[in-house]
Amino acid sequence: MVLPAMTTKHRIFTTSFASVYPFYIAKAEKKGRTKAEVDAIICWLTGYSQKALEAQLKKQTDFETFFQQAPKMNPARSLIKGVVCGVRVEDVEEPTMREIRYLDKLVDELAKGKSMEKILRA
């Protein structure tokens, strides 16, 4: 008897974006950056307006839904390269996980002191 392959979702997909958001802010602020810069990065990546981002946070939307409902994922996000948590972001095959890793990488770049112009691939 052959059982169908089980595809288990990574737990980050069902984690509320709002529960991780403060960690993005803390990471940036610890290095002298601001919440406004983190919000600008999130809005650049996803197409959410500031108001829509705040609504998603208030609704406790999970990561998967947060990215699925994003108004317009920035086409320039494919320019984001590098390693996050030991994984090359450009090699992540699962689409939602890749979006999450893109965001992680952008916040890392902010915390490392990169200019907003470079972070937003201007």
Image (tube, rainbow, N blue to C red):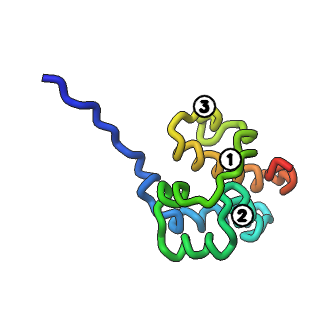
Q: What amino acid is labelled 1 in the image?
A: Lys
Residue under pointer 3: 91
x, y percentage for residue 46?
65, 57
The furthest residue to the top: 1
State the separation of the CA atoms marked 2 and 3: 24 Å
Residue drawn where x is 28% and y is 31% of the image: 5
- Residue 72 versus residue 67: which sits nearer the camera? 72
Q: What amino acid is labelled 3 in the image?
A: Asp
Q: What amino acid is labelled 2 in the image?
A: Val
SS at mark 2? Answer: helix
State the separation of the CA atoms marked 1 and 3: 13 Å
- Residue 114 versus residue 9: which sits nearer the camera? 9
SS at mark 3? Answer: helix
x, y percentage for residue 62?
46, 61
Dot 1 or dot 3, earlier in sequence: 3
**In the rendered view, does 116 fall on the left or right side of 41?**
right
Residue 105: which numbered mark, if any? 1
SS at mark 1? Answer: helix
Dot 2 or dot 1, earlier in sequence: 2
Quadrant into which the N terminus falls: top left
Residue under pointer 2: 38
Vertical relation: 20 (above or below) 88 = below
**In the rendered view, does 55 fall on the left or right side of 80?**
left
Vertical relation: 62 (above or below) 81 = below
Residue drawn where x is 42% and y is 46% of the image: 10
